Image (cartoon, rainbow, N blue to C red):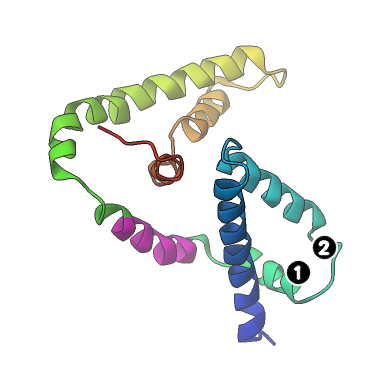
Amino acid sequence: MMNAVEVLSFLFFALFIGVITTYSLSRFIPSLPYTVVVFLIGAFFSLSYGNVNGTINNSLFLWYAIDPELILFIFLPALLFGESMGLNFYQIRCTIGASALLAGPGALFGAFCIGVLSKFCLPFNWSWSLSLILGAILCPTDPVGTRFYFRLQSIIIN
């Protein structure tokens, strides 16, 4: 039977690791990119999954079985609210044209370029549809992560 502590232990453990990582990088190694470190930590935990027994491993097993839409409904409102509180409407009004151009045709062009490169440069002999799907997956950036990284590096966006 599922225990509430077991379900929440991985969530709090991941938040703790995130806080420690953010603090350590900003304090001791500010030149090291946050996304690279988070990727390496995630790779370490994914490789160690199943090899370690305990509460964290059981909790991680329960999180693997969670419905993806539930994750979306839990975290998306908090992310959108957090970003909307820091909006500068003057800045939005000045950059709406460039943003629309990059978000629409720019994203399509980037996805197409990544699809063409994956078709001709990767040794997998993929079809055009699979190559373009890879381009569509890899093309968009994460605006919340980008803004977090800018804030972490003290970059002012004008």
At which x and y percent is residue 31? 58, 35
In the depicted view, which residue is nearer to us: 38 or 106? Answer: 38
Q: Residue at x 86, y 62 (%)?
A: 51
Q: Residue at x 45, y 24 (%)?
A: 111
Q: Main secondary structure of the magenta part?
A: helix
Residue 73: in magenta span: yes
- Return the residue at label 1: 57
Q: Magenta stretch: give its range.
A: 69-82
Q: Residue furthest right?
A: 51
Q: Which quadrant would residue 134 be assigned to in this image?
A: top right
Classify residue 126 by image quadrant: top right
As drawn, is 11 to the left or to the right of 98? right
| Numbered circle sitting on residue 66 | none
Residue, disc 2? 50
Q: Position of residue 1 (x, y in %)?
A: 70, 87
Q: Are marks 1 and 2 in contact (CB under 8 Å)?
A: yes
Q: Is residue 85 magenta?
A: no
Percent coordinates x, y for residue 16 in the rendering: 60, 66
Residue at x 65%, y 86% (from the top left corner): 3
Q: Is residue 4 above or below residue 18?
A: below
Q: Nearer the viewer, residue 110 or 78?
A: 78
Residue name at image x 50 percent, y 25 percent: 132
The residue lying toward the viewer, choosing from 62 and 95, is 95
- Where disc 2 sits, the SS reads loop
Residue 10 position, x and y percent, is 64, 70
Is residue 70 left or right of 109 when viewed as pictured? right
Q: CA distance from mark 1 to mark 2?
A: 7 Å
**Tag 1 secondary structure:** helix
Q: Amino acid at mark 2?
A: Gly
The outermost residue toward the top is: 120
